Image (cartoon, rainbow, N blue to C red):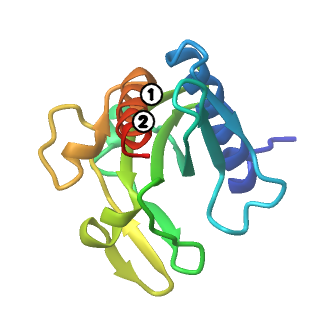
Amino acid sequence: MHMTLSTTQIGRIGENIVGAQLMLASAGRLSPFVPLADDGGVDLLLHDKVTGCSVTVQVKGRVAKDDSALGYVQFDVRTSTFRDGPDMFLLAVLLDMQQGSVQRAWLIPMAELPAVSMRKTEKLAITPSPSSASKDRYTPYRCQDMREVAERLIDHLDRTGVES
């Protein structure tokens, strides 16, 4: 019997990979928490052990295909779960399921999402190119690895901790 992962399974796997890799990439500084219910568009709460501040992250994952077939990848955020605030982020990740890792990531502040997304029926869609050489509207948000995602989040948290 040939089975494939459901989109729900892929989403949960992606959230777990992201949480674990952010802990590793931040040397334990970022501590991820998962809500009991994720119906509010929050998949992870990341607590910073240094500043005591937190950010919320909505994780959207897609499974990587053969590199030659990739022109762009689409990630959708339902308008019913969209929330913007100074400490809210969309983390779109392209998952390598064979390696159990993130192949490419885009970290977008939720406050900026409406300006860089395409509004479709009941959702905001982004369509970044996973190519490291691409120059599209998502290039400023593209992270080469989870270390870069962690660095950007820590920079944000350091600024937030200073302002508080």
Q: Residue 92: which disc?
A: none
Q: Which residue is mark 1?
A: 150
Amino acid at the residue labelled 2: Leu
Up/down of 131 relative to 111, above or below: above
- 85 sits to left or right of 5: left
Q: Dot 2 surroundings within 10 Å: few (below 14), some, or many (20 or more)?
A: many
> CB atoms at circles 2 and 1 under 8 Å apart?
yes
Amino acid at the residue labelled 1: Ala
The residue that appears at 42% across and 30% down in the rendered structure is 154
The residue that appears at 41% across and 61% down in the rendered structure is 110
- The alpha-carbon separation of the residues under discs 2 and 1 comes to 5 Å
Q: Position of residue 77 (x, y in %)?
A: 50, 67
- Quarter of the image where one finds residue 156: top left
Up/down of 84 relative to 47, above or below: below
Q: Position of residue 143 (x, y in %)?
A: 32, 33
Q: Which residue is mark 2?
A: 153
The residue that appears at 51% across and 79% down in the rendered structure is 79
Q: Dot 1 surroundings within 10 Å: few (below 14), some, or many (20 or more)?
A: many
Give SS at disc 2.
Answer: helix
- 67 sits to left or right of 53: left
Up/down of 4 relative to 110, above or below: above
Q: Name, please, the residue furthest toward the right.
A: 1
Up/down of 67 relative to 74, above or below: above
Q: Position of residue 160 (x, y in %)?
A: 40, 43
